[in-house]
Image: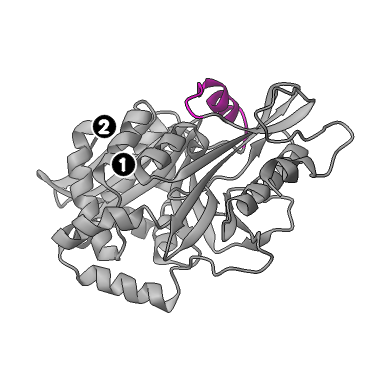
Amino acid sequence: MDIAQTIARLPERADAVVAMISPAPVRMAFEIVETPAGRSTYEWDAFVANQEQGSFYHRYAWRALNEQFFGHRAIYLEARNGGALAGVLPLVLTRSHVFGRILCSMPFVNYGGPVSTDEATAQHLIEAAQAYAGQLDADYLELRCATPLDTAMQLSTHKISMTIELQPDPDQLWSAFTPKHRKNVRRAYKDRLTVISGGRELLETFYSVMQRSWRELGTPLYEVGYFEAILNAFPDCTRIFVCRQDSEPMAVALVGYHGQTVEGMWAGTTRAGHDLDANYVLYWDMIKDACERGFKRFHLGRSTAGSGAEQFKKKWNAVPNQLYWYYHFPRGYEKSIVNINHPVFHLAIGTWRKLPLWVTRRLGPPIARLIP
């Protein structure tokens, strides 16, 4: 049974009829369609901006980033009610011999999942995604959501997002830190650490630190062109921060802006930066900057519950928000899910850390594009 037939068999509701995914020019009261590539992004992005579940990672420009730089197929679903946009769900199919075929929303970033005006529309989008997973012979469908879904899909709660509620005056946040934390931040500043921020002009510095930092973490890094494309796609909604001792970069971060929220996306620190606690200076400058720009929340990125990263972020009075990762197995049996805590991955991480930097620079990008 193909996708059109599967979607057509979805349960009907009293006030809506799910249309077949088909190029046929049939206008129905309710339909789910795949957004054509190359279409104007304005309607999609305006919808995402006006919905509570919408995030920086739901913006339409991520489609081209995943297709052009990683070579993955992107499927962007729209739910329309009487022609009006009522929901969206971005999906990306990643394929590799090691990790299998994974239909994910969204890979490589903190989260994704459906965005809709009501729960019924979200359900239709989920059912359509499940149909696509079967048609595309995916090992499993993975929906990484910041809010819970009303679904029977298998749920994992091993990831959290750490969030700081910002204030217009950063001194209010500073006063709420523990005396020990304030002392650590002041001490780090005394080591001649300063922070600059900007755009593409800091990309080379950002990438150089990231290459060294992620090698130390045992994690392959994307090609520099991917980060450049992100800056180009979101020129007014991204910013690079660099913490330096004199002129030497010690720690870096790339953040995104969406509505009233700052999204911490990627960060890295050199060995010397770790010794100098450069992250204390980097994070406090980023938090102050977010307050002064009028943002209400700072998501410090995704963390594994109970990890060292979570403990560091708690020092800034960041509050853990549960992330909800849902799984559907179209073949009717559970397929092994990518899990970095597996002994095989621990071995790979340990090996990667020992490789020369010139080797990880060469091998990192083709490997990183396969790890969702």
Residue at 48% of width from left, 62% of height from top?
100
* Separation (CA) of disc 2 from disc 1: 14 Å
Q: Nearer the viewer, residue 99 or 210?
A: 99
Q: Which residues are magenta?
A: 37-52
Disc assigned to residue 247 = none
Residue at 57% of width from left, 22% of height from top?
43
> The residue under label 1 is which amino acid type?
Tyr
Residue 42 covered by magenta stretch? yes
Q: In the rendered image, which quarter is residue 332 located in? A: bottom right
Q: Secondary structure at mark 1?
A: helix
Q: Residues within 10 Å of mark 2 (few under 14, many from 20)?
A: some
| x and y percentages locating residue 5 in the rendered image | 74, 43
Residue at 37% of width from left, 46% of height from top?
70
3 displayed left or right of 96: right
| x and y percentages locating residue 311 in the rendered image | 43, 63
Mark 2, residue position: 199
Q: Nearer the viewer, residue 82 or 252?
A: 82
Camera sees residue 125: no
Q: Nearer the viewer, residue 109 or 181?
A: 109
> The residue under label 2 is which amino acid type?
Gly
| x and y percentages locating residue 83 in the rendered image | 71, 21
Mark 1, residue position: 226
| Mark earlier in primary sequence (2, 1) | 2
| x and y percentages locating residue 203 in the rendered image | 22, 38
Camera sees residue 253: yes
Q: In the rendered image, which quarter is residue 10 located in? A: top right
